[in-house]
Amino acid sequence: MRRNAREYDTELRANGRIISLDGVAYQGRTVLREGPDQFAPLERWAKGVAETLGEPVTWRALDHGELAARGTVQPGPGAQNLRAL
């Protein structure tokens, strides 16, 4: 692992459930560089999935089972709900 980096258990959720699209569960382990924008990659990941789904997506990062950070992103105004199609 890189210096000044930490590994987290990460996941994306919609409606309280871990997102699964085409058989792929959106959870795993992610290495993030420490710093003020440490969780920005998770936020971008969640934003892309929210745009695809057309609904809010919550991201979480756990460090040794403890919540390290979380956030919820909204899809943009032009997003369509993939699940409704």
Image: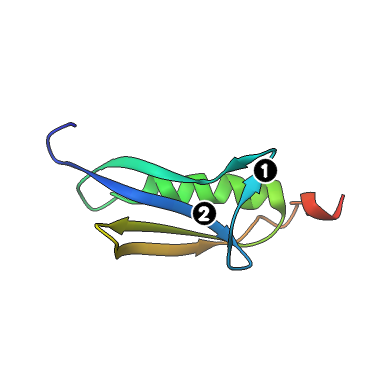
| Rendering coords of residue 5 (x, y %) | 19, 40
Residue 64 shown left or right of residue 84 in the figure: left
Residue 80 in sight from this viewpoint: no
Amino acid type indicated by mark 1? Leu
* Residue 12 seen in this snapshot: yes
Checking the image for residue 76, the label placed there is: none
Q: Residue at x 79, y 53 (%)?
A: 83
Mark 1 Cα shell of 10 Å, populated few (<14), some (14-19), many (≥20): few
| Quarter assignment of residue 55 | bottom right
Which residue in the protein does label 1 denote? Answer: 21
Judged from the image, the secondary structure of the residue bearing numbered disc 2 is: strand
State the count of labels: 2
As drawn, 49 above or below 62: above
Query: Does residue 41 appear to the left or right of 32 in the view shown?
Result: right
Q: Which residue is mark 2?
A: 12
Q: Residue at x 70, y 51 (%)?
A: 53
Q: Are marks 2 and 1 in contact (CB under 8 Å)?
A: no
The residue drawn where x is 13% and y is 40% is 4
Q: Residue furthest left?
A: 3
Query: Dot 1: what SS?
Result: strand
Q: Residue 2 placed where, x, y %?
A: 17, 31
Q: Is residue 51 left or right of residue 30?
A: right
Report the amino acid beneath label 2. Leu
Label 2 to label 1: alpha-carbon separation? 11 Å
Q: In the displayed structure, does residue 23 sit left or right of residue 32? A: right
Q: Earlier in the sequence, mark 2 or mark 1?
A: 2
Q: Position of residue 31 (x, y in %)?
A: 29, 39
